[in-house]
Each structure stands twice: as C-alpha cells, then as structure tokens.
Image: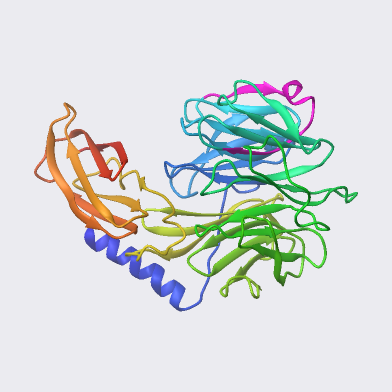
Amino acid sequence: MKKLIIIFVFIFFNTLMSFSQTWVQTLNGRNVWSLAKDNQENIYAGGLTGANSRIWKSSNAGTTWDTIYIGSGATMWDFGFDDLGNIYVANFSNGLLKSTNNGANFSVIPLSVFNNKNLQGVECGSNGYVFITTSSGFFRSTDFGQTFTETALTGFNCLPVLVDRDSTNIVYAGVSSAAGTGIGFYRSTDFGLSFSQNLNPGKNGYNLFQRHNGDLYMITTTSPFNFDKSTNKGLTWTTVSNLTQAQRGITVSGLNTFYTSGNGGVFRSLNNGQSFENFNFTNSATPILSFQYFAVLYIAVGTSGSASGGVWIYPEAAIQSTNGENENAVRFNLFQNYPNPFNPNTVIQYSVIENLFVTLKVYDILGNEILTLVNEKRPAGNHSVEWDASGYPSGVYYYKIQSGNFISTRKMLLVK
C-alpha cells in the first residue's frame, strides 16, 4: 500500500512539474450546468434540460457517476447542503428538490411555493436557514426548507447566493439580467430578510466566491469581463483584472491560484487574479469546482455538447502535508478511508484549521476501542494516517476523531 501511494504521488508531481496537462472527460455526452461537493467527499453534477434533466453523483472523484434523479426537463441550476446533511437542488422550472437520505430519494417543493418564479440558486446557512434566488426575487426558509417566504430583491433576476464564512447573518446575492435591470451585487446583514443598495453596479453578477480569509470575488458576463475583489465583506469593490470573454464559474486552489470557466474554456491565474491565461481547455464551460479526494486536489468543469459535453476532471496536485495555508483545508473534516473496503491497509485523511490536539481512534463493531492512530497536537492543514489491519479479523470498524469541539465518526470495512 505504501509503495502504491508513493508511486501515485510521484506520477502526479512529475506530471505537474513537466507542465503537461491532461483533462479527463467523464459523464460523456451529457450537458452539465452545475457542480457541487458535500462534506462526505461526494461530488454532484446537475444537467441542462431535456434528457439531461438529471442529477448525477460520484464518490470516486468523478471517475464514475450514478444517476440519482431523473427530472422532467428542467435545468438543475444549483446545489445546497444543510447542517443535517439534507441536499437541496434548485430546479429551474419545477421547484426545489430536497433529499434527506443522501440522494436516494428526492421530494419536490413545487414552484407555486416560490410564487411561480424560476429557481436559480440555493445556499444553506446555519440553524435551518435555506436561501433561494429566483428569476424575480429572493426567498428564504428558517426551518430547513419546510416553509419559504419571499423577502427581498423582488423583480430582480437573482443568480448566485453565498453565505459569509465568518458571519452567517451576512448573505450575498448577485443580480444578472439581459435588460440590465439592477445588475450587480447586493448584501444582507439580517439573514436575507432585506438587502443593501447595489454595491457593485453596472455588471452582471453572475458568480461569487469567498476565500478562507474572507475576501470576496465576483465574475461577470458583462464586457470588459471584470474580475472584481472586495476585502470588506462586499461593501466596496475594486477591479483586479479583465478576462477576455464572459465567465460563469470561479474557484480557487492554493494560496494564489484562481480558476474561472466560461466562454473560451478554463482560465487560470497564478498571481491572485492579476492576470489569466487559458488552462489548456477551450470548450466553453459553465460550472467549475475544486475539490480534494484521497490527498489529491482536483479541478472539475461542466460542459455541454454531444461530443465535448460532460464533466472534465484535472488532477491538479498531490498533497503530502500543509502548513495550514491551503485553501482546501477550510474546515475540520474527517474523510472516508481509502480504499474501502480494504485489505489490510487503508488511509484515513482529516483536516484541521487550528493548531490543536487531535485524537484519532479505531473501534470494533461493539464500540470497543482497539487502536489509537493519532494522539498529538497537529498543525492546521490536511493530514493522513495509514492503518495496517493485518492483525485484525474481517469486519466492520469505526474510526473517530476529536479535536477541540470537533467530533466525527465514520465506518469502514475490512475484508480478508
């Protein structure tokens, strides 16, 4: 197992160091309009109308996909995940889809609940808040999606919605419209009940992103296609640079590496957005997503077309250790062991965002503690530990992490 991991890391680093690039097409031939990740290392893709009105799920970094929902023709615009693990999907002309069992089943909250306005964005806050953007206004729920009320921005074509990382009462929304009505950026400080005046007017607020340090970024489909930044929670904005074409997706990986997706493909900046270059991908794309799986950072984009459509995956970098500055280590997390099932070795990965004492223990199916894998202070960042279970019988085991107030448990299966 150790040799395989070393070889795996070696291959990725040599690929990166030689500046070669390989995008791998998966979900071939599908029209993909949205991408998202949950806290369990799963990634989701939402399709674009007609036969592609579907939701797909991958638990192996996009290598294979399962169809978990077939719609009736409407686009799956956006995904949200709440504190209880529920999944929400903004379905453009059918309503809000909700799953309480990891996507095994979805119920539909009909469009009539949203005054028959088309859904375009969904984001979950804390304590039951769910925020919805529509083609003509903003809605919120305070009870995990049981009820919704239209609160603000009525008449505006609202697209992205984002909850502030540090202050969950602060909610951001972008407005986009072909007619130009109210286009820009809006900010709420009362959980989406009301919004400020337009704080970045004159450009379609097509997508928003917030870094771990709190800085906000906005991209647009309005010429000259500004890449804008705010360092004060959206109160004021500056244009960092201009892109060459309309952009619809944005993500960040590492300290200074930004990626955008839109007309002309995928673009990358290695200098905090001061300049962008095409990242060897020229198919026009809408969503872009950075995610981590088994100590590897990936970039994924969604495209449309019979030949080029689907999800394209790029393995960006292999992680050996971090010093806490990696953008992907933004929260405490305990990931699913890999491989699982396993025999006899498996790797458990976890993330911490503070320099705290960490304990990671293994338990048998009866709840008896059998092994301590980690029992020391660990720096902020991504970490992994390998368990050699050659001396243990086949069966179900549990592993549990505790660091400060963070506690999480997962299940794994040893098969000999």
Instruction: Name the spot of residue 416 as percent of width and height, x first.
Output: 18, 39
- In-image side of 376 versus 235 (left or right): left
- Verify whether residue 30 appears in magenta: no
Instruction: Name the spot of residue 177 as percent of width and height, x first.
Output: 84, 48
- In-image side of 352 versus 248 (left or right): left
Residue 149 vertical position relative to residue 245 in the rendered view, above or below = above
Residue 213 vertical position relative to residue 127 in the rendered view, above or below = below
Span colored in magenta: 105-124
Residue sitting farthest toward the bottom: 18
Image quadrant where residue 155 sits: top right
User: Residue shown at 11%/38% (left/top)?
Assistant: 370
Residue sitting farthest toward the left: 391
User: Residue shown at 76%/21% (left/top)?
Assistant: 112
Question: Can the viewer see residue 409?
Answer: yes
Q: How is the image coloured?
A: rainbow
Q: Quadrant of the N terminus?
A: bottom left
Instruction: Name the spot of residue 262 as percent of width and height, x first.
Output: 71, 59
User: Residue shown at 52%/39% (left/top)?
Assistant: 57
User: Residue shown at 65%/73% (left/top)?
Assistant: 276
